[in-house]
Amino acid sequence: MVDTTAVPDLPLNMRTSLPHSPITDTLLTVLDVLDTQVLILDQESYIRFFNKPYFDAYWKQFRRAGVSPANILGLPLSKLTGGQREWELLQHTMKSGKVLQKFYFQDDDSHYSGLSDLIPIVTDTFAGIMVIQQEHEKLRELSRQINHYKNLTAQFREKLDSKGSLPPRFQQIVGTSAPFLKVLRVGAQVAASSGSVCILGESGTGKEVFAEAIHYSSAYAQGPLVKVNCAAIPESLMESELFGYEKGAFTGANLNGNPGKFELANNGTLFLDEVGEMPPSMQVKLLRALQEKEITRVGGRKPIKLNFRLITATNRNLEEMVKEGTFREDLYYRICIIPLHLPPLRERRSDIPLLAREFISSLDMPQWKERRFTEEVMEHFMNYNWPGNIRELKNCVERMAILCPEEEIGEEYLPAAVVKSAQVLPGASVTPDLSQYKLHDILDKVEYDAIRSVLSLTGGNKAKAIEILGISKRSFYLKLDKYGLR
């Protein structure tokens, strides 16, 4: 039978036995209006304060344990939970005096399973610990991400030395050179998290293609992918484009108002291309929207809570822009949690023949699909520097296919820029550098990235990381030493 009994309204003075002082009373008032569950224990783990969200979440459990609301204060936590590991951890944190963030509780005998921040408190009149528990919605999101990551790492273990180990959308991206396989694998690992990704690389390296692969390989794949080119939006319209506007917000506004790109990306992915072009006036507003995961429409008053994954891209050097003061440092660290560097085409020359054939076969005219390039043309392709990268190569292939009436496309149809500027670069070779294909080095890189990503995902909880990675404790710590991750 479902218990429909309403939660009792327990006033603050019945939820604290801490010594009174102006500072303490103000602090408790603030803690009481938070959405997060907060519990304060003394040095012996007796309950001395609990805020309303904590009581709302656990009052039924107190009742099942035969504890009335009036008797919660002064109750030893161990009497309620029986969680020995939880009690020992609280004692250790109080003795060490160090804050423990994002610790993952998961004991069969504990009343609580999830992330907590443990904060020691020492004043003239009280010594104890504050326990701040993450919201249930955040815990469900973390669980979803961990399960998704488990599935993805299982795929990695099958074939780490080929694209067959990657999610389908990453397998479809053309390229098999060692530098490109490395970034493909990193991109697939990144897709498993919900962290903000910044795709860096020269113009034409395929940043949008990678953004699509990350979205459709992530836990947000069922939601929308909303793309925004920041360089194409006038500064005066950028706020209304991103955040939307209410009816009558400005002259010429839609009578019914209009949702912005952030709202359209709810439960999906927002891709901000050319984010380095965002004007300073919008950077601070973007930062707030990302920190709070909420926006307010232009002309509106009601904040709108959102859930989305952010991917940004730029061909500019954001670190240099931060030093120059043209890009906010706090925004840089917010959007660039996971940087993904795409190599230029000149650093993955062995992929040029694959890309050229792919562009020929994808042309709209069926009679062009069997066309091929002469060896001389391919040699020019391999030796040219490709400042426009993949985009320039595709343009070149399509132009030559249109102009050439024969099945075999010769060098007379090459653009003048390719013929004039093509040079064999120092250290470049038509044949790939086989030293880049050392399997041991590739495996080490993937293993290092996987362990680092899982540790980040679990907030540094090594026990949880061992469980996700599916390796022994001894093997895990040996690898931490090997890669300097302790």
Image (cartoon, rainbow, N blue to C red):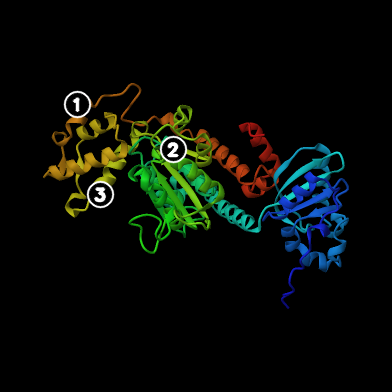
Give the labeled residue for mark 1: 420
Give amino acid for label 1: Lys
On the image, the x and y values in percent for residue 99 come to 74, 40
Sequence-wise, the earlier of marks 1 and 2 is 2
Q: What's the residue type where badge 2 is placed?
A: Pro
Q: Which residue is mark 2?
A: 280
User: Which quadrant holds residue 471?
Assistant: top right
The residue that appears at 18% across and 53% down in the rendered structure is 365
Residue 476 can be seen, yes or no: yes
Circle 2: element type: helix
Q: Residue at x 44, y 38 (%)?
A: 280
Distance between the Cα atoms at labels 1 and 3? Answer: 27 Å
- Residue 170 in view in this figure: no
Q: Quadrant of the N terminus?
A: bottom right
Relative side of 1 to 142, left or right: right
Please give the name of the residue rendered at 76% of the width and 62% of the height, measured from the top-left corner.
Answer: 58
In the rendered image, the residue lying farthest to the bottom is 1
Question: Badge 1: few (under 14), some or many (20 or more) residues near its Cα, within 10 Å?
Answer: few
Q: Tell me where residue 239 appears, x and y as whole percent.
A: 42, 48
Dot 2, how many residues are within 10 Å of its Cα: few (below 14), some (14-19), or many (20+)? some
Query: Residue 236 at x, y = what percent?
Result: 36, 45
Q: Foreground residue, 433 or 135? A: 135
Closest to the observer, 327 or 165 = 327
Disc 1 + disc 2, Cβ < 8 Å: no
